Image (cartoon, rainbow, N blue to C red):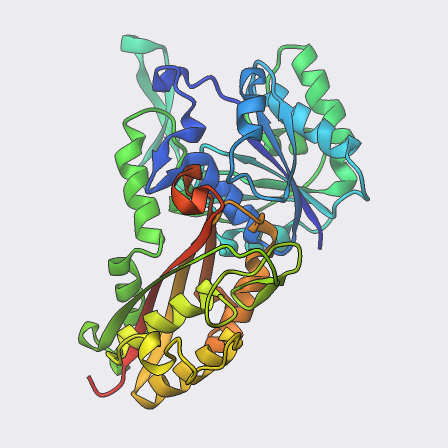
Amino acid sequence: MLVDVVLVAAGSGTRMGGTDKSLINVAGAPLLRWSLDALQAHPSVRRVVLVTAAERVHAYGSLGWIPSKVTQIATGGDSRSASVLAGLTALREGPGDRADVIAVHDAARPGLSRELLDRLFAACGSDASAPTLPLSDSIVQIQGKDSARVRAGSVPRETVAAVQTPQCFAGQHLDRMISEIGTLLASDSLPTDETSVLERIGVTVHLVDGDARLRKLTDSSDLPVMEGLLSSGASSVGGRLTEIANVLGARASLASLRVGFGDDVHPVGTSGELRLGGVHFPESPALTGHSDGDVVLHAIADALLGAANLGDLGRFFPATDATPRGVDSGDLLREVVQRTTAAGLTPHWIELTITARSPRLADRLPEMGERIAALVGLPASSVSVKASTGNLIGDEGAGRAVRCTVLLLAEQRGA
């Protein structure tokens, strides 16, 4: 299945005091980046058209963390509907065959997950799909306005729901969607969302379970709640410890869990071939070091050894004649895995960040995650690989070095 996505980030930010809320830092990352990273990581997503205000197009194009699946940054309109129309038109005019599924998502909803996207894409079929959340409060009909409002009846909660984005539809409906949105805009009858347009053209919208983390950032009062939602779902130490303890159930307690931290940095050399996370980058020179210089695998090995209280990588593989020069770091990591396993350590989660000015890493991160998972003996879903330019400061930002930091969570048998 191929999925193309329109990501709308063209709001004026009026209710945020005119601030571009897509770049507000929420739970450690710009709001926009949360959605982009989730879409970049999903294997079915082929490309993303990012829609923003005309005055932001150039600035967005210069952001170092825009991932490779963003193939176009389009200029939005005066309304959300106009911006969606611009994004859908850009998709239709783009290269390649039409996608099986087209999704429209608001960047103001950063809590995208792989599980939600899977549900939406599977439910879409030849029709459409959207995520919804049940309403817990009583729902009433209202008569009158402002202070003259009175209750005019009740609506059964089970017959209504709150709809979120992304909202998806089969690629075969793209032309009709573009035409219908254009007609509605011309008549100043703005649709509330994509599902309302799909209903107008006779497409069935299948509803799937939504996600509370997809709360929309509307004004500043939403920020504390969103911080909590995103932090609880992110791989914070406390959250991951509790999650792993719940998964392991009776076999584990918080006392048996271990945290490992790894950090390695190597200067950029002038020859050879760069290796990061066991993945080759023939266009870039190798990092300087006694081994092949793979800072990612070195940092993971150090995190494993630290969690098992076995010391550091240099203790087992010193930069002397005892360690073959240019040795494959994958071989070093395999031996570390054997040693830590023998010591009773079982890893459950790895999160790492690579800081480098070049090469561009975004489109290689999934491959790197799979390679690391195979080396350590984890499912790929338990390895999170991120990249940063380090805001172009320091040796890493200047392109003189590459750094990797790792957080690892594991269970210690017999603790």
Above/below status of 90 relative to 342: above
Query: Of residues 393 and 6, which is closer to you in this image?
Result: 393
Query: Of residues 173 and 136, which is closer to you in this image?
Result: 173
* Quadrant position of the C terminus in the picture: bottom left
Quadrant position of residue 76: top right
Residue 41 in the image: x percent, y percent? 55, 53
What residue is rendered at 63% in x and 44% in y? Answer: 69
Above/below status of 207 relative to 408: above
* Quadrant position of the N terminus in the picture: bottom right
What residue is rendered at 70% in x and 51% in y? Answer: 125
Residue 179 in the image: x percent, y percent? 76, 24
Quadrant position of residue 228: top left
Residue 105 in the image: x percent, y percent? 55, 36
Q: Is residue 19 visible?
A: yes
Q: In the visual, does 107 lie left or right of 90?
A: left
What residue is rendered at 49% in x and 45% in y? Answer: 399
Q: Is residue 355 visible?
A: no
Above/below status of 251 relative to 371: below
Q: In the visual, does 288 lie left or right of 282?
A: left
Above/below status of 256 relative to 101: below
Query: Of residues 398 and 154, which is closer to you in this image?
Result: 398
Quadrant position of residue 31: top left
Residue 167 in the image: x percent, y percent? 58, 39
Q: In the visual, does 93 lie left or right of 215?
A: right
Numbered disc total: 0
Q: Residue furthest bottom?
A: 342
